Image (cartoon, helix red, strand yellow):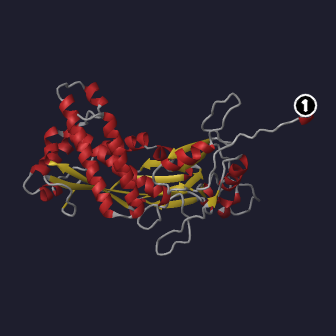
Amino acid sequence: MRNLDLQQKERAEILQRMSQAITENNSEAYVQAFNDLAASIQEAVRAEYEQAIQSNDASILAQRGVRQLTSEENQYYQAVIEAMRSNNPKQALTEVNKILPKTTIDAVFEDLTANHPLLDAINFQNTGALVEMIVSTSSGVAGWGDLTATISNELAGSFAVIELGQKKLSAFIPVAKAMLDLGPAWLDRYVRTLLVEALATELEAAIVDGDGNGKPLGMTRKLSGAVDGVYPRKTDTAITDLSPTTFGTILNTVSQGPNSKRRTVPELLMVVNPTDYYTKVFPATTPRTTDGGYTTGVFPYPTKVVVSPAVPSGKAVFGLAKRYFFGLGTSKGGKLEYSDEYKFLEDQRVYLIKLYGNGRALDENAFVYVDISGLVPVVQKVEVTNIDDFPTA
C-alpha cells in the first residue's frame, strides 16, 4: 500500500485538474482527470481491503470508511454486483428494481459536508426526491400597518420556488470487474468515495460561479438579466486592503436585505482560491505585534474564510453563507445505469447515477464579488507622539 501522504497529495492534484477543467470547459481534460481519480480510489480501496479483510472487526473496518450496511443496502449492492457480472449488464441492470437506498445518499451528503467547508457553510440540504422547494428569500414577513391595509406588499418577494428537477448532475462511476469480488460493503465504500469527490468538485464550481444555464446560479451571478439562459456576473469591486473602511463598505451592501430592510450580519463568509489565500489574504491578515511576533487571521469583523479552487484567480466572494440555498437529491428511480457512451479503461464498465438539484442566493445583496488582485500585505502603522520630548542634536 502506498504512503498515505503521497495518496492524498496525488488526490489533491487530480481534484485541482478537475476543477480547472470545469473552469476552462475542457471536457477531455476533465475525463482524463476523472479517470485518474477513479483509478486512484480503486487502488486505495483494494489496498485497504487486502489489509483489513483479515480482521472482521467492525470498528477497524469503520475506521477505514467501510460502513456496516443495512439489509436494504446489502441487497441493493448484491443485486448490482450480479447485474454487472452478467453477459448483458445493461439489460440486467435495467431489470434491477431496487433503487439506491436513501441511507447511502445520506452517507454521501455527510461525507460531502464533512470534507468540504464550502458545502458545510452554506444552506446545503439533501432534498431526496422532491421536485421543488419553497424557500423564504427575506429574513421576515411581519410588518406594521393600518388594520385595513393589505398584506400583499409585505409578502411579495418573500418566498421563492426553486425547481430542483431542472438541473441534473450526472456522476459517472467506472467500476473495474475486479472490484466486484470485494463484496457489497467495499463496493459501497468505492461508490461513496468517488461520488463525494466528483460531486464536490462540480458543486463548488456551480455554487461559486454557476451561470444558471443548465446549472445552478452561483454567488458571483446576478439574479436577473439572463440572456439565453446565462445570468451575468456581478461587477467585481476592487479592494486593496482588508481594513475597517473596506469591510464597512462590504457590510453596508450585505446588510441590505430584500424589501429595503436592514438585517444583522453576525459573520461574513469569504471564499477565495488557495493560491490567493496564501499569497494575498494571509499577508493582508497577519500583522506583526509589538513584541515582534505575528498574529494570523486578523479581520476587523467576524469572518469565516473558506478556500475553494472554484474561485477565479484574483477574485473573492464575501457574503452571508446561509443565504445561499442548495438542494440536491436523487432522481425518482435513483438507479445506477449502464453507459456505453464513456470508455475510461479496459476491463471496466461505466455506470452513472443522476442527481437532481438546484441552488441560488436568496437575494441580490447576499454576496459581494470583489477583485483582490491588488491586495497588499498589512503594515503596522507606528506614530511618534510628543516629539518635543526627544533631544535634538
Relative depth, front residue between 81 and 318: 318
171 in relation to 166, above or below = above
Relative depth, front residue between 315 and 92: 315
- Report the quarter where the N terminus lies: top left
89 in relation to 387, above or below = below
Relative depth, front residue between 7 and 175: 7
Quadrant of residue 293 in the image?
Answer: top right
- Image location (x, y in percent) of residue 138: 61, 55
Q: Residue at x 19, y 52 (%)?
A: 97
Relative depth, front residue between 303 and 264: 303
324 in relation to 165, above or below = above
- Image location (x, y in percent) of residue 74: 21, 39
- Report the quarter where the C terminus lies: top right
- Image location (x, y in percent) of residue 136: 56, 55
Instruction: Using the rendered image of the protein, determine whether residue 189 is visible from the camera's viewpoint.
Output: yes
Label 1 SS: loop
12 in relation to 168, above or below = above
Mark 1 sits on what residue? 391
Quadrant of residue 141 in the image?
Answer: bottom right
Q: Residue furthest right?
A: 388
Mark 1 surroundings: few (<14), some (14-19) or many (≥20) residues within 10 A: few
Q: Residue at x 30, y 43 (%)?
A: 193
